[in-house]
């Protein structure tokens, strides 16, 4: 087992290994700075939430190549013995600077920067992007859903529709950071100490045939359960819940009902009315089925009597925006700023710092500066690893989650809209950075 | 380590465990049949490709709960000792029937069916759906991209933008099944014996500053490489390649150039013209950057001089369709058909077989039948596991890939369109299944 449960360092794109070998034989060992940032905020997003740093640090601490992996590389016929020997003793010895998880950030702002000999830094590209992109996407999705649900309960039911197991587990973590309250995913609950929850499936009702029988049996084992009422007719389902309440009397402790189909607005109103008429005011209504921030916002703004949401399919793949334009770019080599001038893909040179400015408790703008600059705002990027070693133990997930909620409170209110604001959050370049950038562009 | 490299059986939704405990204490051990199928073909899809069976079988063979996992469950306070003891000795003892990987299928057709005591079958839901959905999505995406590329080379560059590591690895496998020729993902190459390939990144050019210097050095180590020409100006980039060819003369073995930005159609034509004028006819042009079946089809139909494509971001998340309406539903219990009549989510009862009919080498229609029926067409669903043991060793991936290509050749040509055909492939119910289904619906 790799240290820290780390993941195989062979999770790279082949070109990282061929470039590393080239650097090795050229004797190029200069210090490179690679910067991870999002080039453009995607459609409908006015901010992003940083997330996934912990997994990256864990990977960096344990990065290494096993002999079985080296043997595979040897078999490819592309790599020479001296380089494979170098890989055999590979470990990450560089420094990392990053935004703390749960921080809001904007386009062109570094989420993470790696400072290391160029071949080392190059080998980390794929894993870092893979982990940060997905958790940023989902933490941001979670924050948007939390905003749109206005204090109603939201639970992650998505792992079955996530893209693979890693996405299922990391999504539970990132949703939680974004404000989602619990997950149905037991493994994620165990790994990250996230509250786990769940109700019942249609199959349970079907095995028992009659809904009343299924409700009776399930609630006798789990008195405070949520009963699923749409296996057959929802109206009949509610009648069976009411019947159960009448049979059990004071022993009826069921907390609510769940609906997973139909026009949720219409049926929730019917169900609420039926429950209220039976005096079952305390029963909550939970819904699930293709929900995301847009459908939840509509339900909430129409005052539909729904108390909680299970989010799944559309949310866990971030279906309105399933990827980010996130990159890992060389911005500095041996102390010199580096840039790329490809059409629409120009990168801003130099290792950086982001300064954030606050007025009346709200963020007003950020300034992107060269790392060594000292400006009046709050510097957001912190050193997190030095010489391959973490500078502090992993942060508690609840702390990251609290930070995220605090951050969102400080955003200018117009940026909380679910659609793109016409007034994006201002991210400026410091004078020094702007002048250096302009000079370099003229030279290229 | 779990047998077969299997994944933690705690990757479940909590309700599967609470239902399993309910079945346990109710003494319900009847044989259940759960069926995995896609309720509706998504937008723009006229067929799907089955994929991911091997990973499911591997998981089922190794399914078990470790004592650490049992301890966690105990700590949740929801589970009683007798049930936890049952989990401690859990293994899968059921039967599995499935479509061979690489088979084309349509809505409501079972991809896989599990026949097992109900509590066992219930516990497998999340992993099975999680693995099958994603690989089906990506094998189908790969097949569509292969169709649209018309024999030009296609390589998977997507792992950095996949949703987590598992998606990165499984996508490489599923793309390969769909017809993609290689992957940049070294770990996937190692695990699945898929050809790996790659070129160079902009950072390599930037470290060397001058393109010519970088091209010289890289091609001296990798003479048959592909040179990336858009770090600065593409026109200048091509001039440097031509310069290198002049310097090296007969030793110039470079196979091609890659462009990762700009209007690919326009610049490819310019690059082709420049290379041809320099007599470098043999150099191929590869492109990458936000490609999927739609942009590739446009490039190909416009006869743009591009020889190969690197697919990444949009393809690996299947951005035009990032999820399937795929479900794991109880269809039979103790020999009796089971159905659910929720609005728009009705399920067809009974363990099934799919019969496919062929005329002049092309598929004409399928008939969904009850598993025990014998009809004239080709039965597609095969027994793959009995009593928890595989009935045959894992299939070679190349065989699955070949099957997929054969299958696509047999599809009626109008279904090969990238948009939804007005004439969907006919999937009918057998008389027996239809009559039973109708009777059951009337009773509910």
Image: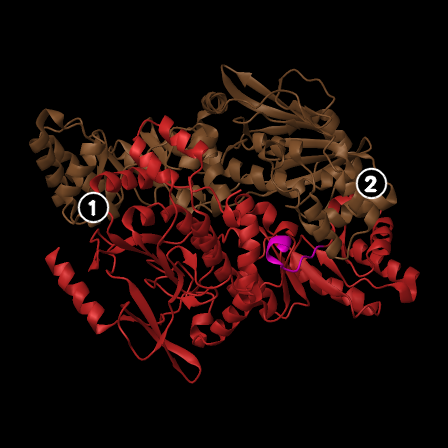
Chain colours: A brown, B red
Which chain does the residue under circle 2 lie in? A
> Residue B245's x, y, as percent?
87, 62
Helix, strand, or loop for circle 1? helix
Numbered-mark total: 2
A382 or B9: nearer the viewer: B9
A102 or B352: nearer the viewer: B352
Determine whether B433 is above or below A35 in the image: below
Does A416 sit left or right of A55 as displayed? Answer: left
Does A209 sit left or right of A345 as displayed? Answer: left
Q: Residues within 10 Å of mark 1 (few under 14, many from 20)?
A: many
Residue marked by disc 2:
A443
Q: Residues within 10 Å of mark 2 (few under 14, many from 20)?
A: few
Question: Closer to the camera: disc 2 or disc 1?
Answer: 1
Does B149 sit left or right of A271 as displayed? Answer: right
Identify the magenta region: B189-198
Determine whether A6 is above or below B336 in the image: above
> Residue B26's x, y, as percent?
20, 41
Residue marked by disc 1:
A205
**What is the distance, in whole Å, between disc 2 and disc 1 at their CAs?**
72 Å
Which quadrant would the C terminus of chain A be assigned to in this image?
top right
B4 or A60: nearer the viewer: B4
Q: Which mark is residue B387?
A: none
Residue B431 colored in magenta in the image: no
Is residue B320 in view from this perspective? no
Q: Residue, x 84% and y 46% (percent of image)?
A: A82
Q: Residue, x 61% and y 22% (percent of image)?
A: A380
> Residue B101's x, y, as percent?
47, 64
């Amino acid at each position: 087992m790799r240290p820290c449960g780390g993941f195989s360092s062979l999770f790279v794109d082949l070109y990282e290994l061929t470039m590393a070998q080239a650097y090795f034989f050229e004797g190029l060992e200069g210090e490179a700075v690679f910067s991870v940032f999002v080039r453009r905020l995607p459609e409908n997003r006015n901010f992003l939430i940083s997330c996934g740093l912990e997994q990256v640090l864990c990977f960096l601490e344990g990065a290494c190549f096993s002999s079985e992996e080296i043997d595979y590389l040897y078999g490819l016929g592309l790599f020479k013995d001296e380089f494979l020997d170098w890989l055999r003793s590979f470990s990450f010895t560089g420094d990392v600077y990053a935004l703390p998880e749960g921080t809001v950030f904007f386009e062109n702002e570094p989420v993470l920067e790696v400072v290391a000999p160029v071949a080392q830094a190059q080998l980390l590209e794929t894993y870092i992007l893979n982990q940060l992109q997905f958790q940023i996407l989902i933490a941001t999705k979670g924050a948007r859903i939390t905003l749109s649900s206005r204090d109603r309960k939201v639970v992650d039911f998505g792992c079955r529709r996530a893209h693979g197991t890693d996405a299922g587990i990391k999504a539970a973590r990132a949703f939680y950071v974004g404000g989602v309250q619990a997950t149905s995913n037991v493994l994620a609950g165990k790994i990250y100490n996230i509250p786990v929850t769940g109700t019942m499936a249609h199959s349970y009702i079907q095995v028992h045939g009659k809904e009343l029988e299924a409700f009776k049996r399930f609630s006798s084992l789990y008195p405070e359960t949520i009963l699923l009422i749409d296996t057959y007719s929802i109206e009949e389902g509610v009648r069976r819940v009411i019947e159960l309440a009448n049979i059990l009397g004071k022993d009826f402790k069921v907390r609510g009902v769940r609906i997973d189909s139909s026009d949720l607005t219409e049926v929730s109103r019917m169900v609420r009315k039926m429950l209220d008429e039976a005096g079952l005011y305390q029963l909550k209504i939970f819904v699930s089925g293709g929900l995301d921030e847009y459908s939840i916002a509509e339900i909430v703004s129409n005052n539909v009597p729904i108390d909680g949401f299970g989010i799944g399919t559309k949310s866990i793949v971030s279906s309105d925006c399933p990827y980010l334009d996130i990159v890992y770019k060389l911005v500095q080599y041996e102390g010199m700023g580096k840039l790329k001038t490809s059409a629409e893909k120009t990168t801003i040179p130099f290792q950086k710092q982001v300064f954030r400015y606050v007025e009346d408790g709200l963020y007003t703008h950020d300034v992107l500066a060269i790392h060594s600059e000292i400006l009046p705002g709050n510097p957001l990027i912190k050193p997190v690893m030095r010489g391959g070693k973490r500078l502090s133990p992993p942060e508690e997930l609840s702390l990251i989650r609290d930070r995220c909620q605090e951050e969102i409170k400080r955003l200018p209110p117009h940026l909380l809209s679910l659609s793109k604001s016409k007034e994006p959050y201002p991210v400026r370049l410091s004078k020094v950075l702007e002048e250096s950038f302009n000079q370099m562009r003229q030279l290229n």
